[in-house]
Image (spheres, rainbow, N blue to C red):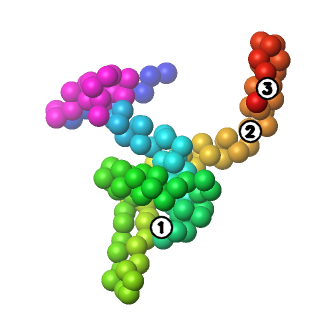
Amino acid sequence: MKVRHELTRHQPARESDAFHTDCPGRHVLNHVTSRWGVLILSALREGDLRFYELRDRIGGISEKMLSQNLRVLCRDGLVSREVVPDSPPRVSYGLTPLGSGLAQYTNALVEWITLHTHDIVDAQTAYDAAAGTPQK
């Protein structure tokens, strides 16, 4: 079943179709579906977090990668950055209404992967055994 989206007169079909090469949504898709983008959005679904709390919540992310991804997600309008003038200034990150709507889907993806990781690993093992590929 195809889902049709209404286009405004300012949105030619190619600009709202992620399957089209020139669609700006492809850039957003890359930001959101990157490993760090998914995890940042899902972590912020639990509530606003300071930078170091977010870094600690997402194991393995470097401060540089976290900073870069937060900047991109803020630019996309998905994450908000709030600076509280204190000494030193406190910076926290949260989801915008737009980001909150998206985070329910990224969170569902993370939950699905968590529930089915063993099934996927079993499938990889079976595939590798059938193909004669050494297991990692």
Residue topped by disc 1: 51
Q: How crowded is mark 1: few (under 14 residues within 10 Å), some or many (20 or more)?
A: some
Q: Which amino acid does label 1 sit on?
A: Phe
Image vertical order of residue 100 relative to residue 26, above or below: below
8 left or right, relative to 108: left
Residue with the most extreme bottom position:
87
Q: Residue at x 37, y 63 (%)?
A: 80
Viewer-nearest residue: 67 or 9? 67
Image vertical order of residue 59 relative to residue 122, above or below: below
Tell me if residue 18 is in the magenta stretch.
Answer: yes
Q: Residue at x 21, y 32 (%)?
A: 11
Viewer-nearest residue: 31 or 52? 52
Instruction: Give the residues in magenta.
Output: 9-24
- Determine which quarter of the picture holds residue 81: bottom left
Camera-near label (3 vs 2) is 3
Residue topped by disc 3: 135
Q: Which residue is drawn at 29% across and 29% down?
A: 23
110 left or right, relative to 62: right
